[in-house]
Image (cartoon, coloured by chain):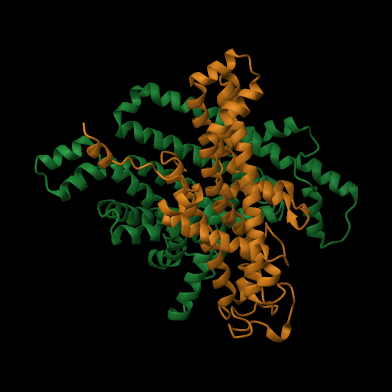
Chain colours: A green, B orange
Amino acid sequence: MLRYTIHRVLLMIPTLLGVAVMVFFMLRLMPGDPVATMLLGDAGGASISKEVIDAERARLGLDQPMYTQFFKWFWGVLHGDFGYSMWTGRSIAYEISIRLELSLQVAVMATILAILLALPLGTLSAIYKDTWIDQSIRMFSIAGLAVPSFWLGMIIILLLLTYFQWIPPLTFTSIWENPWENISQLFWPAVAVGYRYSAVSTRMMRSSILEVLQEDYIRTARARGVFERLVVTRHAMRNALLPVVTVIGLEFAFLIGGLVVTEQVFNLNGIGKLFVLAVARSDFTMIQALVLLVSVFFVLINFAIDMLYAVLDPRIRYR
Amino acid sequence: MNTAAASAIAYKVPKRRHPVLQFMMQQPLGAAGLLVIVAMGVCAAFAPWVAPYDPLTVDYEAMLGAPSPEHWLGTDSFGRDVLSRVIYGARTALAIGFIASFLGATSGAIIGVVSAYFGGRTDMIIQGIMDVLLSFPIIVLAITVVAVLGNNVVLGIDINLIIAISVPMLPRVERVVRASALAIRELPYIDAARAAGFSHTRIIFRHIVPNVVAPYLIMLTAFVAQAILAEASLSFLGLGVTEPTPSWGLMLSGAAADFYQQAPWMIVFPGIAISLGVFAFNLFGDSLRDWLDPKIKI
């Protein structure tokens, strides 16, 4: 197990390094001078002299060669210092930290929702294969892959507004201040993001259970006269969970994609909204920090899944 | 053995039907998806004849009009006909969807085959790059590419938007095609081709590529759905197609975001169009996979 863990950790390093290099240099290829854009924005459209721009570039270290900039930036990142936003001038770590809680909470709520839906629905769909139950669950989940989360969010707001006169609140209440208000505020965004998530997991659960039900040990259990309910819950579901765990983990890392659009609809000031704003303002120090954050998160989740796999299925450790 | 018994066992020679017909009969759901796709394609191709109004004509008299006999799906905040904009939107969605997934799937497939064929260090380096690309969510990578490239409209189509949508697909297709190509590389006829002294290019394009067409086609159709969704999301965020070009995602943003509570038809119908389009391509892609090669995981 230790050998496997070390091997897996070593495999992560080149990927993470590659991500850092790619993000950094890709954004330096951006057309347009972010410094000029920023100063023009501050001056309200008045023209800026070249000296002022050059001074600002020097202050931000943009006049140095690229590789120097990269190593300075990378060294900072290793120490948790992402630099300063080119737009607000505040530290990026601060800008992210005030929004991280909200986005993470929506992501976690969406995950819980997806698991609560996917496990029973996927299992039912597999047990009652080709009946109306299976067909309707499959339609429900294939629709989940098609409905864009931002549109679903708008429809939810529309319905809530029509029937309950509910409008998305303008300010965010932390779960530590007022748990009830917080959860009622974030529940619907979580539904909008979580529907697609649950659809993906339901499909995986269904095909995984169908596969497991073909196994010899299921036939053995049935032959021994084990109740069908126990065959499904004890033997089939447990063994079918492995691939589902992978999908749930991978999709969790990708939830940020859903959040980018959903936060816009529900007027939530989270990481997704910050990302869109940063792109709109070509705030490239912010973009690179956020993209790096997302992909590091993804690589770590991947690592966690592999570890979980090794714990759940001992065969993997000895490969 | 008497002749009567022999003739009783009439061997039924399977009738060879046209593959499209075969597909339609074996995969009714896929056929339904295909039907929707064809209908969308017809609407897109003949938009000027199908649409009742010009999608760009502003009519302040008819602002935010509810669905009525004149405007079946109502009008938006500029008085433009929603039905006509949805029909013209199919053009944008299909054009970008097809071109982007064709670009992403084809370049992914070529890289995958090359990576599998050469193996060794080449394979390792390519897989390393693909791993890096795979660690970005589709929409995040697409947005980043948009941020880097900006807009570049040629013939009414934003080339950079297409590139942005196809980049995230490339590594995903590459993975699947590479896996298929790895299995083919080990087959005796590849050894035979090598022994015959054929060039790498010839072996790759004449002997390996024809055998990875199935996974390629499956990934291609699956990614048209993804591309339509990505285009809609990017346009919704204001980073994709720009006004006044009709696009389903764009119809849900801007003024629509301010007025949809009073004029729900502005957002309901474009959203249905996106969902239906993606749904149809998913259905078709799923069935195509079951039909061609059920083992492939998308």
In the picture, the quarter occupied by the N terminus of chain A is top left
In percent of width and height, residue B153 lies at 77, 54
Front residue (pair A54, A202): A202
Q: Is residue A269 visible to us here? A: no
Q: Residue at x 76, y 58 (%)?
A: B156
In percent of width and height, residue A250 lies at 45, 43
Q: Residue furthest left?
A: A225
In percent of width and height, residue B107 lies at 64, 37
Does residue B190 appear to the left or right of B253 in the view shown? left
Front residue (pair A296, B133): B133
Front residue (pair B211, B117): B211
Quadrant of res A73: top right
Q: How many numbered circles are shown?
A: 0
| Residue B19 higher or lower than B262, as above or below | above
Does residue B91 appear to the left or right of A196 in the view shown? right
| Residue A239 higher or lower than B67, as above or below | above
In percent of width and height, residue B152 lies at 77, 52
Q: Is residue A206 visible to us here? A: yes
Front residue (pair A36, B93): B93
Quadrant of res B96: bottom right
Q: Residue at x 63, y 84 (%)?
A: B65
Q: Residue furthest front?
A: B3
Q: Residue at x 34, y 31 (%)?
A: A310
In the picture, the quarter occupied by the C terminus of chain A is top left
